[in-house]
Amino acid sequence: MKRADNNHIYKKFRTTYETFVYECYTINKNEAEVVLNFQFNLSNLYYFNPEIRIPKKSFFVNDNMSDDLLNNIVFNIGMIELVSYWKTACPKKVIIKPFSLSKSQIDFWKKIYFNGLGEFFYLNSIEADINNFMEIEVDSDKKFTKVNINNSSSTIIPIGGGKDSIVTLELLRKFSENNLCLIMNPRGATVKTIETAGYSMNDVFEIHRKIDPLLLELNSQGFLNGHTPFSALLAFVTVLAALLTNRKHIALSNENSANESTVADTNINHQYSKSFEFENDFRNYVSENISESFNYFSFLRPLDEIQIAKLFSKFPKYHKVFRSCNAGSKTDVWCGNCPKCMFVYIILSPFLEKEKMIEIFGKNLLEDKNLTLYFDQLTGIEKVKPFECIGTVDEVNWSLNKIIEKQKDSELPYLLKHYVSNHNFQNIKLKFDENLINHFNSEHFLIPEFEAILTEKLHEDIIK
């Protein structure tokens, strides 16, 4: 992705638009739904009102829950929602009006905003550091105290429509019959995934997030735009879902590979809000400031992408319905022309036959010369990885070497010829660990029951 020279615009906007204000939020509950509305303003010139609607279903608990806990969670959803609107002009001062924040909370938010916007700063060539990019000022004396509740040991599983959440969903069937799927802004692949799993939309916790149209209008006018930490927003919304349905566990599907930087030798990571660092910070923030009653964790954190790909290959009923392509998400297709499609094709190919891969993607992506740049970015020939949720350079090289081994004496497709002929090929072969497929990362927050499920499956289907 090409970088834009927007640092001068960043500096100009910070002078023109001096403040960003989190004015308030509202919670409206009726028999049909729960509606959250947030009000932000940019220097009293532009006013934003994003909205989240949650249809009520049979698994919702009664409304006589702690109002303090509900308000605390929703207030914090507003804290993460605001960054999507702040980034339009990046004012130095952010004013928080609804409730007070402690110094440790302010430090938490500045860290999320700065690291979660790392890609945004990089691609806009913005010169910023964590100490000067933002000042958070609190304009309220009202404080929350954390509230603990007696909730069930059931699990919420967010479904994104890709292979990772499918693996989590299938493996956790053994843990509880009361698992609850959660989908934000349902689309083709997410709906087909839960239907393939045997659920209906009546069984799913739905979240409908609506972006204020003014944000898109300002983007078209030349205001700053770029990636924001969506998974951090999802994290806070899942805690709300856990409260509304009286569940304790929230099982994400972020893997160990999400920890690798997108830009070599930097901390810039497209997947920052999927990283172990964020997971740890978020868990601490929730337990210290909201409630100790929720267990947010990534079930797949001990695994790498290649292990997840092998596990996914064992669930053929999902092969026609899963989608990870952002470019094709609106039409529910694999576009076949983006780095995400290229990555998924590579990572699955060691475990599925070529004919099956072509059936899924519509063509052999390894024969497509137009994907050479993305291919080189994925293999580490280029120093900057694609800004996508993808695995590590080592995993890509491990997979490509396994694909080459499978080819035996057959003629290699175009991109594999290109790969083998690259002058770094022999060095690349020496850099990755052949035993990567057997790796089990010890940095995770799985309780023993969940870890046992994962290790059993690992030894059953992966470690031979």
Image (cartoon, grey):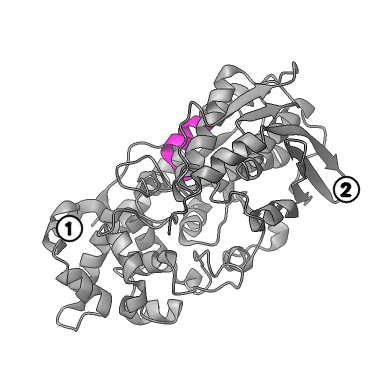
The quarter of the rendered structure image containing the N terminus is bottom left
| 253 lies above or below 130 | below
Residue 354 x, y percent position in the rendering? 32, 79
Q: Specify start and end residues of the magenta stretch as a single range.
A: 274-282
**Mark nearer the N terminus (1 vs 2):** 2
Q: Would residue 377 appear left or right of 200 to someone viewing this image? A: left
Snapshot quadrant of residue 415: bottom left
Of 349 and 263, nearer the camera is: 263
Residue marked by disc 1? 428
Q: Would residue 107 appear left or right of 100 to someone viewing this image? A: left
Q: Kindly identify the amino acid type of the residue bearing the numbered disc 2.
A: Glu
Q: Which mark is residue 31?
A: 2
Residue 347 x, y percent position in the rendering? 34, 64
As drawn, the residue found furthest toward the right would be 30
Tell me the element at label 2. loop
Magenta stretch prevailing secondary structure: helix
Tell me the element at label 1. helix
Residue 103 x, y percent position in the rendering? 57, 18
Q: Is residue 234 magenta?
A: no
Q: Would residue 23 appear left or right of 156 to someone viewing this image? A: right
Q: Are marks 1 and 2 in contact (CB under 8 Å)?
A: no
Judge whether residue 453 can be spotted in this image: yes
| 4 lies above or below 155 | below
Of 110 and 165, nearer the camera is: 110
| 68 lies above or below 276 | above
Snapshot quadrant of residue 195: bottom right
Q: Kindly identify the amino acid type of the residue bearing the numbered disc 1.
A: Ile
Marks 1 and 2, how far apart at CA? 59 Å
Q: Residues within 10 Å of mark 2 (few under 14, many from 20)?
A: few
Judge whether residue 154 can be spotted in this image: no
Q: Residue at x 40, y 82 (%)?
A: 363
